Amino acid sequence: MPASDPLITRSSPPARVTVGLSDIGILRRVLGMALRYRRGMAIALVTTLLAAVFQLLIPQYLGKAVDSARGLLAGGDAEAARAALWRTAFLLLGASVLRGLFTMWHNYQGEAIGQRIAYDLRMAYYAQLQRLSFDFHDRTHSGELITRGMLDIEGIRMVINAGILRLVLITVLVGVGATLLLRQDLWLGLIALSFVPFAAWRSVVARLRLRAGWLALQEKLGILTRVMEENLQGIRVVRAFAAQPHELGKFDAISEETLALADHRIDIRVRNTAAMTYAFFLAMGLLLWVGGGKVLAGEISVGTLAEFLAFMAILQMPVRQLGMMVNAFARASMSGGRLFEVLDREPEIQDAPDAKELRITDTALRFENVSFTYAGARTGARASGGGPTLATLHDISFEVRAGRTLGIVGPPGSGKSTIAHLIPRYYDVGGGRITIDGQDVRDVTLGSLRRAVSLVQQDTFLFTASIENNVAYGNPWAERDRIAHSSEMARLHDYIAGLPKDYETLVGERGVSLSGGQRQRLSIARSILVDAPILIFDDSTAAVDAATEQGIREALRSQSTRRATIIIAHRLGSLMDADEIVFLEGGRIVERGSHQELLALGGRYASLYALQSLGNEPVAGAPAAPSPVAEPER
Ligand code: ATP
């Protein structure tokens, strides 16, 4: 992945993301999406044209009506004049009603197609977010992805009605309207149309300025949202440090900048509306003056002058809206660029073209000289002038089979979780390979691999749903008995059974109504229920007391003959029963063996064991254990 990948940047605001595709290409693609709804688009275009035609008839009928009324007032054949007036009035009424109906229809049709495109894009975007690799999600701010999924889809949705259909409407109204006026009377036509170039120019310039302001405003709103989101998520930390004034100050500073931008936008809008209105009434005054003179001179009728005035009134709205149309196209091309940038991205981790279903026979998981570097460390090293990349894992080899348990221990940051994440292919190894029953994990389908591996994550995440739904997340069709059994194995059933609504109890946002240990046990129950042949606990009992943890281990042992288990833990009591324990440091295995063998070795493991069991007294002859909080030197 290139270091300059525009999407992979946590700090860049959405507005500054480079658009990779050309604007025309993006708009063509949006149009292509609209053309999927050919029938709907055809109806929308025909109704738009009809609305424009009937709108153009109105001034002409109005002019005729005025002349007929004048004829009636002037005397002469009153009967014929009255009949002509009635006929014109009916035609005027008919044209107005039909214009209204077709306007309503084309608006409805344009909105409906826009909404369908938005639905298609939303589904495609959400599906793509599910496909994209962890590597992508690690380095892309979720706020940015949410913005793209909401505002950018909205930007594309609006281009159908406010862009494409409006373009057709404005072209017909201004084109045909101007031709009719100029043909009728060149000078009056020029006066009536004189406000058009000025109003169009002001409208476009103002819209583009408003657009720049809108982007800046979005950026500020994005920061505001982030500050508020972090404050709410970290509300306990904020209160614990009595940092409310600091947080309020932070919010206030950005709010003020947001307000200033909003004020600036209002200023642009008001000034331009005033300028356009001024130009329109100036042209109208001129038309009345020159046209009135022509009426008095008998060169044109009062009806013709009324027709010119009505044309002006009809033309002013679409001309004023020209800016909105330009804005709609500009926004759609930018939003489309940002959205397609995500949609077109190929996930780094995906099924190989000839991937097969994973076949589990002996459940033998092997790491063969595995090394790995996070993409962030790779690009970081490149960005800093090509220095050495900080490999996270070096030359890791081990095997764990059904019925056996591997323990992994080591200081924070030594690479334990990374090992766990490589097994279900959250990331791909940089060197070496990982096999399950002899099949390279890169050669099997991701679906079958992930069904075979159940990982209890270090950070528990619960959905805002009932306990039952959370436990059954990996197997929604599981019966209540099986859910209860998994919870029993995770030593959580008794607690749940004591709740007034037992398994129907809602856990609150991210499981807020449960204690840390209860959340961990719930996520253990969720993983047990899946009944995968490979089960990995990534420091997932850190918040559980030793006695409860012992109970969970014993319950799991009764089933472990058909399961390969990996336990990652800082507390040695969690893994000392493992068949093999590896001690990781700086991404390398520095010691390995059973608990007894490692104690006899008198190395880092033994020293850590002494620290944990004897209270800081190292085993004789053992080197000092690395601090459990210090990052390894690399
Ligand atoms: P702990 O005991 O604290 O959970 P660990 O041994 O599980 O630590 P890992 O989470 O595997 O350590 O991290 C190993 C190293 O990789 C650390 O230096 C960490 O900063 C880095 N690292 C972890 N995740 C990422 C990531 N997504 N992108 C870049 N670097 C990462």
Image (cartoon, grey):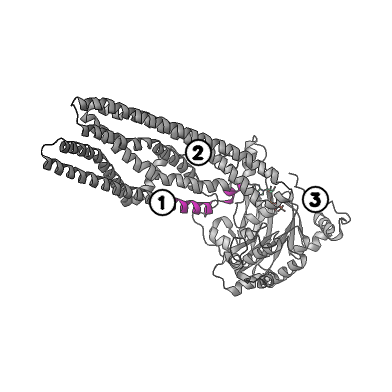
User: Please, which residue is most extreme toward the bottom here?
Assistant: 481
- In this view, 552 is above or below 585: below
Pointer 3 or 2: first along the chain: 2
Question: Which residue corresponds to the image point at 75% horizontal and 63% vertical from the top-left?
Answer: 574
Residue 627 circle label: 3
Element type at marker 3? loop
Residues in magenta? 118-138
**Are the residues flagged by discs 3 and 1 in contact, CB closer than 8 Å?**
no
Q: At which x and y percent is residue 532?
A: 61, 66
Q: Residue 459 appears in which quarter of the rendering?
A: bottom right
User: Please, which residue is most extreme toward the left here?
Assistant: 77
Pointer 3 or 1: first along the chain: 1
Left or right relative to 629: residue 289 = left
Q: Amino acid at mark 1?
A: Gln
Inspect the magenta stretch and tell me whether residue 121 lies in it: yes
Q: Amino acid at mark 2?
A: Trp
CB at mark 1 closer than 8 A to ligand 1? no
Residue 115 circle label: 1
Left or right relative to 290: residue 138 = right
Q: Which residue is mark 2?
A: 214
Question: Counting other residues with Cα less than 10 Å from the Cα at mark 3, is it few (<14), some (14-19), or many (20 or more)?
Answer: few
Residue 392 versus residue 146: which sits nearer the camera? 146
Q: At which x and y percent is residue 81?
A: 14, 40
**Quadrant in which the N terminus is drawn:** top right
Q: At which x and y percent is residue 354?
A: 49, 56
Question: Which residue corresponds to the image point at 57% horizontal and 63% vertical from the top-left?
Answer: 451
